[in-house]
Image (spheres, rainbow, N blue to C red):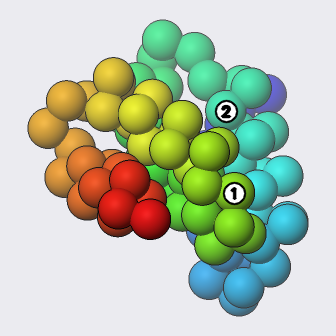
Amino acid sequence: WKPEPYFALGLILQRSKNLHGAAEAYESAARLLTAQDAGLAPDLHNNLGTVYHAQGDDTRAEKQFRRALQLQRDYAPARANLEAVSRR
């Protein structure tokens, strides 16, 4: 199995405000990540963090934003999201 279809489904569900479904899709994608998916991983963790944040779970959101930044230090969306969550 590949993570890309789950990531795409997560995007669709997130845009349609189905946060529970988006979280499940992103979590499934995260479980399938391999070293070959390095380009997808920061986006995936950032998006999962935004879903957790929208659900009111800032602890889990912060963890995902930090993971995205571990994978790509200069990833501006994750840095901005982490700063926003940290200000709360």
Q: Is residue 15 left or right of residue 73?
A: right
Location of residue 88 in the rendering, given as x and y in whole percent from the top left corner: 44, 65
Location of residue 77 in the rendering, given as x and y in whole percent from the top left corner: 28, 57
Q: Residue lying furthest left in this view?
A: 74
Which of marks 2 and 1 precedes in the sequence? 2
Pointer 1 local density, CA inside 10 Å: few below 14, some 14–19, many at least 20: some
Location of residue 66 in the rendering, given as x and y in whole percent from the top left corner: 41, 34
Q: Is residue 41 left or right of residue 33?
A: left
Q: Residue lying furthest bottom in this view?
A: 16
Note whether 2 is above or below 70 in the view shown.
below
Q: CA distance from mark 1 to mark 2?
A: 18 Å
- The amino acid marked with disc number 2 is Ala
Residue plotted at (62% across, 83% down): 15
Q: Is residue 80 left or right of residue 37?
A: left
Residue nearest the viewer, comparing 44 with 58: 58
**Quadrant of the rendering where the N terminus is positioned:** top right
Q: Is residue 65 left or right of residue 70?
A: right
Which residue carries the number 1 mark? 57
Residue nearest the viewer, comparing 61 with 19: 61
Which residue carries the number 2 mark? 30
Residue nearest the viewer, comparing 20 with 57: 57
Residue plotted at (76% across, 56% down): 23
Q: Secondary structure at mark 2?
A: helix
